[in-house]
Structure formats: C-alpha cells, structure tokens
Amino acid sequence: MSAAKILIVEDEGVVALEIQDQLELLGYEVVGIAITGNEAVRLTAQSQPDLILMDIILRDSMDGIEAAHQIQQEYDIPVVYLTAHSDEATLQRAKITTPFGYIIKPFNERDLHITLEMALYKHQMEQKLRSSEQRLRLLVESTKDVILTLNLKGEHTYLHTANQFGFLDEDMIGKTPYDIFDYDTANEVMQRVKKVIATGEPSVYELELFINGQTYWFNEHAYPLLDRRGNVTAVAIIARNVSDIKRLKGILPICAWCGRNIRNEDGQWQRLDVYLTEHADIQVSHGLCPDCHQQMKAKR
C-alpha cells in the first residue's frame, strides 16, 4: 500500500519543517509546504494530496478556514486543522468546513499520527458509502417498481413511483397515505404498515388503489427497517404494478374465426400478440404449430 500524501499548510518555516520530519518518520509522503492560503489552493490542484494538514492562522488575507472552504468546493480532500487557537469563535468557524480532525499546538507525534489515520480512514469510508449510495440510487431509479419508505408516523421519507401516477415524488415527501389516497385505501395501507411495525415481520399482499380517476393493482412487499438494537424505525415497501395483467382477467373478445385478433377497449380489432405485449408484462415470441407447418409445406 502506497504512503498517504500530505500537504502541509503552515506559515512558520521552522514549524513546517519539523512537521515534515515527523510525518516522514511516520511513513507519510509530504507533497508540499504552503505558507499562504492562496498557495495552499494552488498546491492542492498540482499535487492532489490525500489529506491537508492546515494551520488556521496564516499570513495573507486568506486564512486556513477560507482556504479549506475554497478547496472543498473543487476537491474531495479531507482537512485536519492544526492551530494554537482553540477559542469558541474559531471552532465554530472551522466546524462549517466539516474538518476531519483538529490538533491543538503543541502536539506530540502520537496525537498527530492517530488524528491523521482516523481522518484518512473516515474519508475512505465516506467515499465507499457515497459510491454504494450512488449505485443503489441508480438501481432504484431505473426500476419500474414503486419503492417507498414510511417512518413510524406513516409519513413518506422516500418515494419512487417511476412516473406512474402523474405527480412529483418529491411533493409526496412528508405526507401520509391519507394525503394521497381515499380514506379506505389509505387506512388499508396504514393497517399493513402498523402490522409490520408491531411484529417486525415482512408482509406480502395485494392492494387495489384508486389514483387520479384510475384503478391500479399492486403486488406489495413490506419490510421493517431496523436499528442496531433490532427496533423498527421505518417500513420499506416495494410494489409491482400488475394492473395490466389484472385487466386481462375475465373474458377476452378474440375473433372466433381466425383466433388471431382481439377487440380492444376502444372497440378496434388488433393482433392478439400486439395486444398482449401492450397490456401485460410479457414478451411474445413466434413459431409454427404442426398444423400450420404442414399447411405451409403444402402450399409450396
């Protein structure tokens, strides 16, 4: 594993060289020393360090906090502040830039090592978490299923409907099923949610919804979301729209003569395979039955 690259931002030359010696003895690679905020921004762009050890009080007009803020606008690099100033006002300003550590001068080698290792590890875990969240979001947003989460009050905390209902998902955040459906439907949804919360067990069911003047049918799977102690904190629901398949139930008006055409909802005749493809979650393949095969050979 290669040594982590550290950029030192310190306007006291002797102190900066002492820090460099300590870091190199600890196995880090020092990629540069900046004495001003502007130089820190420039060296960050050039060297792309793994971490910046940033003194807060610098000689030029841009102090360490301002430099860290500017760097964070462009780069995903953790900053550890190094300063002799521990007053409340300075701490509050520094907190805005979400530093990965704060070392008060004077410090010893052990404190320096522990703080840097923790900062590097925390940053690595955050990167992995963001990557995992991006993959999960891409997976969720590409599915045609409805995916949602409800807190213990029944309020939507996440909603993905794949644009099936004509409303914006973000408009539903914070609302309950009673704000979206009629009372009976909302009550049925909440009874399912309450059962999952009470038992901590998944639930599978079919739900009929009436939204914007149209009836939908869904196969739904509700799952409890648990905290570290096993307590239910929310309910996640994955719902598959089976409305098209449901509407195929009953009598299908297929032509009695050819058996290949069907009368659709508009009273028009269309090919059966086209109708099935449009109205059900299926793909139609074509082949020749034995009788048709024989007839085709006879015509040749």
Image (cartoon, rainbow, N blue to C red):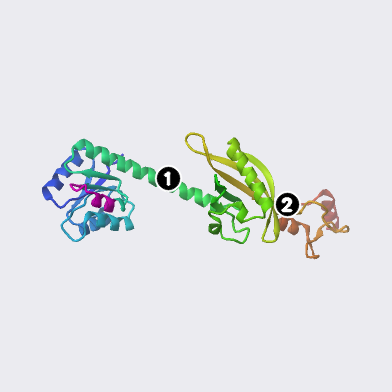
Relative height, residue 4 to residue 243 (above, below): above
State the residue in front, 286 or 230.
230
Query: Mark 2 = which residue?
Result: 245
Q: Residue furthest right?
A: 257
Is residue 85 on the magenta stretch?
yes
| Residue 112 x/y as whole percent | 22, 40
Q: Secondary structure at mark 2?
A: helix
For the point 61% across and 43% down, which residue is it?
193
The quadrant of the image that shows the C terminus is: bottom right
The residue positioned farthest toward the top in the image shown: 229
Relative horizontal placement of residue 274, taking residue 91 as reference (left or right): right
Going 36% across and 44% down the picture, which residue do you hit? 124
Is residue 86 located in the magenta-colored stretch of the structure? yes
Q: Quadrant of the N terminus?
A: top left
Task: Check residue 129 in the rendering and tell me which mark sits there, or answer none.
Answer: 1
Give the residue type at disc 1. Answer: Leu
Q: Position of residue 53 (x, y in %)?
A: 23, 48
6 to the left or right of 130 = left
**Residue 172 at what x, y percent from top left?**
56, 56
Q: Of marks 2 and 1, which one's residue comes earlier in the chain? A: 1
Instruction: Give the quadrant of residue 216.
Output: bottom right
Q: Residues within 10 Å of mark 2 (few under 14, many from 20)?
A: some
The amino acid type, in three-letter code, at marker 2 is Ile
Residue 283 can be seen in this image: no
- Identified at 20% across, 58% down, the residue is 39
Find the magenta span and give its range.
Answer: 83-94
